[in-house]
Image (tube, rainbow, N blue to C red):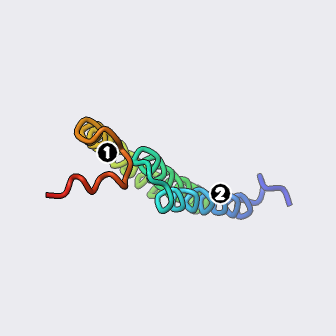
């Protein structure tokens, strides 16, 4: 069947792609030690959720999912700004942004 005329099949592909991107992001957060890469993986997970919300919004014909995506993007932008500021501060104090070296910040 033609995917253009069958929106359910395209939604399935978007669901698969979203799950794949989210899984890559989770693996990156769990197994990487660089704080910058962990921040990028969190952004990848947020974008996977955004893709899922937009695809379900288009499938149902409702714009509520797209409204949620807008708010998620605002929160993601704030998270990036705060995260990068924290990483710059940590790099100035320690000289590395490796997660294993953050135990030096304990009291």
- Quarter residue 3 falls in: bottom right
Q: Is residue 55 left or right of residue 83?
A: right
Q: How many marks?
A: 2
Q: Residue furthest right?
A: 1
Marks 2 and 1, how far apart at CA: 26 Å
First reached walking from the N terminus: tag 2 or tag 1:
2
Residue at the image position 22 percent from the left and 39 percent from the top: 93
Q: Is residue 50 visible?
A: yes
Q: For label 1, count other residues whose C-alpha is less than 10 Å away and answer few (under 14), some (14-19) or many (20+).
A: some
- Quarter residue 36 falls in: top left
Q: Residue furthest left?
A: 107
Residue at the image position 41 percent from the left and 55 percent from the top: 68
Frontmost residue, 37 versus 101: 101
Q: Is residue 14 left or right of residue 78?
A: right
- The tag on residue 103 is none
Frontmost residue, 31 versus 42: 31
Residue at the image position 51 percent from the left and 51 percent from the top: 44
Q: Quadrant of the C terminus?
A: bottom left
Q: Which residue is mark 1?
A: 83
Q: For label 2, count other residues whose C-alpha is less than 10 Å away and answer few (under 14), some (14-19) or many (20+).
A: some
Give percent across and percent down for residue 33: 44, 53
Residue at the image position 34 percent from the left and 41 percent from the top: 96
Q: Secondary structure at mark 2?
A: helix
Frontmost residue, 101 versus 63: 101
Give percent across and percent down for residue 80: 35, 43
Q: Which residue is mark 2?
A: 17
């Amino acid at each position: 069947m033609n995917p253009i005329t069958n929106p359910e099949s395209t939604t399935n592909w978007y669901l698969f792609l979203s799950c794949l991107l989210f899984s890559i992001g989770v693996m990156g957060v769990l197994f990487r030690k660089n704080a910058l890469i962990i921040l990028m993986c969190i952004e990848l997970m947020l974008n996977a959720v955004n893709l899922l919300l937009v695809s379900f919004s288009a499938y149902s014909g409702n714009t509520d999912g797209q409204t949620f995506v807008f708010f998620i993007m605002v929160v993601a932008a704030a998270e990036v700004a705060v995260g990068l500021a924290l990483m710059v501060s940590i790099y100035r104090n320690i000289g590395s942004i490796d997660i294993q070296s953050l135990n030096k910040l304990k009291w």
